[in-house]
Image (cartoon, rainbow, N blue to C red):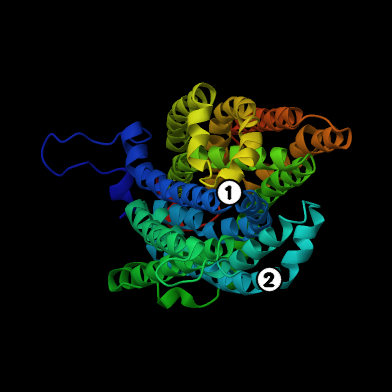
Amino acid sequence: MAERQTLATESNSPGAPTAVPGGSKELLKLALPLIVSQSFMTVQVFVDTVLLSWHDPLEMAASFPAVMWYWLFFGLLQVTAGYTSTFVAQYTGAKRPHRVGAAVWQGIHFAIVAGLLFLVMVPAAPFLIAVSGHPADIQPLEATYLKCLAFAALPMLVMGAINGFFSGRGQTWTVLGIEAVGTAVNIALALVLIFGRLGFPELGIEGAGWATVAGSWAAALFALALMLRRKYRDEFGTLAGWKPERELFRRLMIYGGPAGMQVFLDVLVFHCFTVLVGNLGFAALGATTLTIRLNMIAFLPMMGMGQAICILVGQRLGGNRPDLAEKSTYTGLKWAFGYMCLIALAYVTIPSLLVEPFRPDKPEEQEKFAAVVALVPTLLLCVAVFSVADAINVSFAFALRGAGDTKYVTKLTFALAWPLMVIPTAITVFMGGSVYWCWVFATLHILGMSACFWFRFRSGKWKSMRVIEPGVECEQPV
C-alpha cells in the first residue's frame, strides 16, 4: 500500500508519468495532505488567537504562556507516542505489514497512561503559572486555560499514535480528514463558548479551552474507528496487535523518547524566553506572544513537509535504500527553503497588515493594543531571518528522526539553546535591556541549530541506523 504512495505510477494507463523516487512529485504527493493538515492547525491557532483578541486582549496575551506550559510537557509525550509513524514507515519499507498494528498499539498504550498522568496539571496549574511572575490580572486567565488544556492531552496523544499508522504507510489524506474533523469541532465550539452564543454562557478564554478538548476527542475517536476497519484488521493486525509487547515498547521508548525530549527542551527554551520577556512589561509580552503566534501560523505548514521527509526516509531505510532517503531529504529542503523565503518576505514588507486581524473592537482596548503593535514589526525582522534557517532545521531534523538518530538531535538542542538564547536573554532582562536584543539572541540560536543539523546530516552516520528489529525481509531492497 505504501509502495503505491511512493514508488508506483500516477496512473495505470500506458504512457502515464511516473513519480521519480526521491523527486518532487513523489514528495509532494505525500506532503500535500500533511501540509494542509498542519494548515488546519494553523487555522485553529489563528482563529483562537483572533477570537480571544476580540473578546479581551489580556486573554490573547494570557493564552500563549499557558500554551507554552502545556506544550512543555505535552510535546515530549506527543512526539513519543507519534513516533509510531517511523516504526510503521520502516516496517512498510521492509515489507513486514504484520508488525504494523502491534507497533501502533504500543504508542496507544503509552498515550493512555501518559494522558491520565497529565491530569496532574490541573491542580498544579496555578503554581506553575505563578512561577512566571506575570502581572496579577493575567495569571488567573493563564491558569484557567492551562487547566482546560490538560483534559485534551489524552485524546490528542491517542490521535497522534493512530495518525502514525496512516502517515507511516503514506496514507496522508486520511490524516488530513482526521485533523479536519477536530479543527471543525474546535472552531465551531470556540465561536459559541467564548462569546456566549446559542444560549451558552460567555466563558471567554475558558470557552476556548473546552472547545479544544471537545475537538481533540472528536478527532481521536474518528481516528480509532478508521484504524479498526476490517481491511486494516486483516492486513495490518490493527485489532489483533493490541497486546503489549515488552521489546517493541522498549524500542519505541528508546527512539521515540529522545525525539520527545528534543521537543521538550525546545519548548522549555522558548517557554523560558517568554517568561523572561514577560518581565519587561505587558507590551513586550503581548508583542512576543503575537509575533510567535504569527510565526507559528506560517511555520506549522512546513512541519507537514518535515513529516513527509521523515516518512520517506523511514521507508527507504526500511528497504535499505539510503541513497533515495538522502535524495528525498534534499528535495524537501528545496521546497521548505523556498516557502520560508516567501514567508520572510511577507514579515518584512507587510507587518502592519499581518497584525491587523488581531485588533480588538472595543475602543478602550485600542491603546493597549497599539503599544503591542508598535514593537511587532522589528521583532518580525528577526523572525524573517531565522525563518529561513528553520527550513534547514526542519528538513534535516525530520530526516534524522526518520532514521532513528534522535539522541543527537536532543543533545544538540540542549547544548546550544542555553548559551545562545536563554542565558543572554536573562542577562538582558536583568539589566533592563530591550526586548529587541532578546529576539536577536533567539535568532542566533536558530542559526546555530541549522548549521549543526546540516553537518550531522552530511556526516552520513544516519544511513546505517534502523529502529525496527532485524529481519530477513529487510535484506531485499525495494
Place of residue 78 in the rendered image (x, y in percent of width and height, measured from the top left): 57, 59
Say which quadrant the C terminus sits in.
Answer: top left
Q: Would residue 163 be visible to someone looking at this image?
A: yes
Above or below 8: residue 243: below
SS for dot 1: loop
Residue farthest to the left, as pictured:
14
Residue farthest to the right, as pictured:
431
Q: Which residue is mark 1?
A: 404
Badge 2 crowding class, 10 Å Cα cut-off, few under 14, some 14 to 19, many 20 or more, is: some
Place of residue 428 in the rendered image (x, y in percent of width and height, measured from the top left): 83, 32
The quadrant where residue 226 appears: bottom left
Residue at x 54%, y 69% (from the top left corner): 106
Say which quadrant the N terminus sits in.
Answer: bottom left
Image check: 128 left or right of 328? right
Place of residue 326 in the rendered image (x, y in percent of width and height, measured from the top left): 48, 34
Q: Which residue is mark 2?
A: 122
Whichever of callouts 2 and 1 sits on the residue coming sooner in the sequence is 2
The quadrant where residue 365 appears: top right
Q: Amino acid at mark 2?
A: Val
SS for dot 2: helix
Closer-to-camera residue (325/265): 265
Q: Amino acid at mark 1?
A: Gly
